[in-house]
Image (cartoon, rainbow, N blue to C red):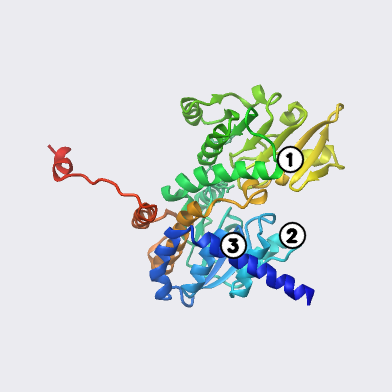
Amino acid sequence: MAIRSEVKEKYEVGRSEYMWAKKSMPVLNRLTHRFVSKRCLENFNLGICLHITKETSVLLMALKDAGAEVNLCPANPLSIQEPIKSFLIKNGIKIFSKKDDNLLDFYSNMEGVLDTRPHIITDDGGELHKRALYRKYNTMGGTEETTSGVNRLKAWCKEGLLMYPIIAVNRSRTKYLFDNKYGTGQSTIEGILKTTGILLSSKRIVVCGYGWVGRGVARCAIGMGAKVTITEVSPLRALEAFFDGFEVKPLDEVISNADIFITCTGQVNVIGQDQIEKIKDGAILCNAGHFDVEIDINYLNSIDQNHFSPRMNVECYRVGENKKKIYLLAKGRVINLVGAEGNSPEVMSISFANQFLSIVYLSQFHEKLNNKIYKTPKKIERKIILTALDSFGLKIDSLTPQQNHYFKT
Ligand SMILES: NC(=O)c1ccc[n+]([C@@H]2O[C@H](COP(=O)([O-])OP(=O)(O)OC[C@H]3O[C@@H](n4cnc5c(N)ncnc54)[C@H](O)[C@@H]3O)[C@@H](O)[C@H]2O)c1
């Protein structure tokens, strides 16, 4: 009886969270409406690997309401919002994930999704696509949500391994300009605050990588009064960070005196053994990049097997002879999704409108596409931009006939 009421409670919380997100996702709601009423995804099986959050539930319910069969597995073992899972299961979405899944289960959940033989595969990070490619699984097409996933798919495409066309949603301006920058910028800071509760004002923060995510994180951190330094490997982005008003330095020059390090590169071992040894006592490490490879967690685990957790999502490691303390947040996984709730519904509304419309596009035009990586079609991008402007109540000017002809004269 007690268990049943706990399940019901979880479902109710999930439903309420879904409704809360949905009301702030007007772009997705408006753009899916027509397809939902026509049930345009009837008879389509979708294999989806995304973070299981309240915003994702709004996308999944729209796909289901458009007639699709939805098979879902999580994109990260630590970012699962259990009440949302409960809500989705009750609404007929098949979820491949159990509460205490280990890493092996996490990957076999992806195989479970592929076993349902999806017509379209939607992924966040490229792991599901990788498994489909290993199986030489040939289907209508796929979409990819994040930069790291697109980078991997580009590498596989170069080697001629792609078995189906991919729409790289992350390459749409309406995705990275808002989600990666403003969404992840804010939610990364939120994750640090929620896990540590510290004051950011006056802290020395190093943001590694000044791409779309790094720009957003740096902007939010400086807005909270932190002293921000950027590290980069791209000369152009380093120059951009400098012109944006940030201090730009090599990591080795700032490693020993910063309070917080945030990796946002998508690269491996950005903070490795050499850096960890030089970090000051009490420093905090966290990562906003897709995979837990940016900080050398294996090294941390090897030097202090008795590391402990002083609070949720914080691990304390004692390093070197002096036993200096280093705090790792969210086990080096995406801090914004593990330590906080992920990106806000307003930005995910735009990202997931890209996802929904790209899935519908693949369902209709896959036969015209090759096994290549495509951007979200321009027509879809424009529709999303105009709907977003309208839903935020924004009006803009248009060129006069004279201005239209000006360049031709
Ligand atoms: N947490 C989230 O919700 C979320 C959202 C979007 C993207 N991401 C992930 O964040 C990561 C970054 O995404 P992005 O869109 O900003 O990518 P991006 O390609 O725009 O930026 C990455 C930047 O890191 C720099 N870089 C690479 N190696 C570096 C190194 N060793 N030191 C310093 N800088 C280095 C690159 O030059 C580049 O400027 C990816 O893994 C992406 O998948 C996470």
Residue 129 image-quadrant placement: bottom right
Alpha-carbon distance for marks 1 and 2?
A: 23 Å
**Crowdedness near tag 1: few (<14), some (14–19) or many (≥20) residues, C-alpha within 10 Å:** many
SS type, badge 1: strand
Which mark is in front, 1 or 2? 1
Residue at screen point 40% across, 70% down = 35
Question: What mark, if any, has residue 328 been given in the picture?
Answer: 1
Does residue 340 lie above or below 282 as drawn?
Answer: below
Residue 135, how many percent across, how many down?
Answer: 61, 64
The amino acid on which the numbered mark 2 sits, given as a three-letter code, is Leu
Going by the image, does 236 lie left or right of 1?
left
Does residue 398 lie above or below 283 as drawn?
Answer: below
Residue 252 image-quadrant placement: top right
The amino acid on which the numbered mark 1 sits, given as a three-letter code, is Leu
The amino acid on which the numbered mark 3 sits, given as a three-letter code, is Glu
Name the residue carrying label 2: 104
Would you say the beta carbon of the disc 3 residue lies within 8 angstroms of ligand 1?
Answer: no
Alpha-carbon distance for marks 3 and 2?
A: 29 Å
Residue at screen point 64% across, 33% down = 200
**In front of the other: 87 or 119:** 87
**In front of the other: 74 or 119:** 74
Name the residue carrying label 3: 17
Residue 403, how many percent across, how many down?
Answer: 17, 41
**In front of the other: 16 or 354:** 16
Would you say the beta carbon of the disc 1 residue lies within 8 angstroms of ligand 1?
Answer: no
Task: Tell me which numbered mark, 1 or 2, is placed earlier along the sequence.
Answer: 2
Determine contact: label 3, label 2, CB under 8 Å: no
Dividing the image into four quarters, tell me where ligand 1 lies. Answer: top right
Residue 396, how many percent across, how many down?
Answer: 29, 47
Which mark is in front, 1 or 3? 3
Which mark is in front, 3 or 2? 3
